[in-house]
Amino acid sequence: MSPLNITEDKISTFFLIGIPGMEHMYIWISIPICLIYITAALGNSTILLIIRTEPSLHEPMYYFLSMLAFSDLCLSFSSLPTMLRIFLFNAPGISIDACITQEFFIHTFTAMESSVLVIMSFDRFIAIRSPLRYGSILTNDRVMQIGVVFAIRCFLFILPFPITLKKLRYCKENLLSYSYCLHQDIMRLACSDNKVNIIYGFFIAILSMLDFSVIVMSYVLILKTVLGIASHQERLKALNTCVSHICAVLIFYMPIISLSIVHRFAKHGSPLIRIFIANIFLLVPPLMNPIVYCVKTRQIREKVLGKLGVKKT
């Protein structure tokens, strides 16, 4: 069934886009996509299991890492249904209610991941700036409270998205821009007044950039603290504790920034670029974060290898 422009009073189905012009390759494209989802699910589930079952990892840094793994896992499952429908079954149609539900979960867990990265930057700053007070500042109970507060914050901030989208009327265009549903993509298809959606969407975008600004500011303060350390070896040791988090921040924010640049300066360019970056945004962070933390965090790496029966040499 091919997407059409509908001229009736109301439409009930949206159509997602896979990769235009490569429909004959969808079954082959689905293979690496499925492998990415399976690897991401296994990687993040392993990190959650390791942290839960190993008492030596019941520390603030690893609790924050488990929050990141949980966000990645949920983000993967949020986009999985439509990705599989498009590339495995060539079925791009999705009901409006299902689409609005998916965009709610995608935006919620994206906001949660951004929030966790902010918390982790604060964690690294405290660990480097006040190592002797680290345990008293970030107690396990306080870490749990921070996690719950940020999760509620993300839920409440994203909740207006589906409520306001549900109130809009869709009667003309029904073709979306990506392989999954996003607020701004659904909103532009409305034929009724969507001014509230535009304003609130802009507000949420500002909050996202505020998260990124807080992370940058945290690393400015971290760098300032590190430069005040006399020993060169101690400087490198302190910075090395931040490498995994810096990689996670770059993996998460680079696709967002790249997509914004493409929308701003290459509006009339090939849509394949936008689709490719948008797919990277949801596929790569859940895949790469467990790999980065397993490679760069010795404690996680040793526990994972131990579970796999690989002895330390």
Image (cartoon, rainbow, N blue to C red):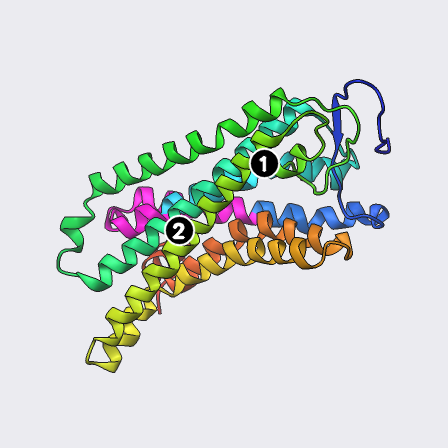
The amino acid type found where label 1 is placed reads Ile
What residue is drawn where x is 66% and y is 26%? Answer: 193
Q: Nearer the viewer, residue 304 or 79?
A: 79
> Relative to residue 143, is residue 156 drawn left or right?
right
Q: What stretch is highlighted in magenta?
A: 39-65
Identify which residue is drawn at 59% across, 45% down: 37
Query: Would residue 48 be counted in the magenta stretch?
Result: yes
Q: Is residue 116 above or below residue 249?
A: above
Residue that numbered label 2 is attached to = 117
- Name the residue nearer the viewer: 134 or 66: 134
Give the main secondary structure of the magenta stretch.
helix
Residue 142 relative to residue 250: left or right: left
Q: Where is residue 115 in the image (x, y as percent from the top left)?
A: 40, 45
Q: Is residue 206 above or below residue 123?
A: above
The residue tagged with tag 2: helix, strand or loop? helix
Mark earlier in primary sequence (1, 2)? 2
Please say whether residue 73 is visible from this viewpoint. no
* Residue 300 visible from this viewpoint: yes
Q: Where is residue 33 in the image (x, y as percent from the top left)?
A: 66, 48
Q: How crowded is mark 2: few (under 14 residues within 10 Å), some or many (20 or more)?
A: many
| Disc on res. 198 | 1
